[in-house]
Image: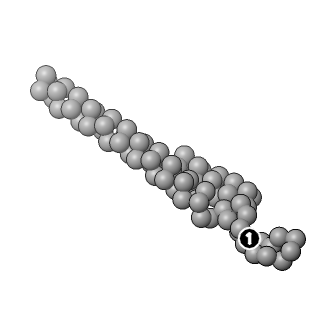
Amino acid sequence: MDLEHHYRHKQHAFDAFCKSTIRNESANAFRQVRVQQDRFVSLRRGYDQNGNPCLAVDEEIRRRIETKLIVAILSFDLN
């Protein structure tokens, strides 16, 4: 019985390690995607008052993508 308890403890420790690793990797992926999103996706082409093309940050698109990413990460099932 003592050996069985030892094996269950080792399995529990390994499962906890795996879950924390997955959680940390998902947080890293979230940060990486957020940096890329801020650089590329949220830019839109527009024109200034003189008709010259310019790039501007589209806050609506940035918020939508950020919300979808957060929902996807929070709904990720570790089991």
Residue at 42%, 42% in the rendered image: 23
Q: Quadrant of residue 12?
A: top left
Where does residue 66 sit, x and y in percent of width and height?
A: 63, 53
Identify the element where label 1 is drawn: strand
Residues packed near mark 1 inside 10 Å, few (<14), some (14 to 19) or many (20 plus): few
Residue at 87%, 71% in the rendered image: 49
In this view, the residue farthest toward the top is 2
59 relative to 50, above or below: above
Specify the amino acid type for callout 1: Cys
User: Is residue 65 rendered to the left or right of residue 29?
Assistant: right
51 relative to 23, above or below: below
Residue carrying label 1: 54
5 relative to 33, above or below: above
User: Is residue 55 visible in this depiction of the protein?
Assistant: yes
In this view, the residue farthest toward the left is 3
Q: Nearer the viewer, residue 12 or 23?
A: 23
User: Is residue 53 rendered to the left or right of residue 42?
Assistant: right
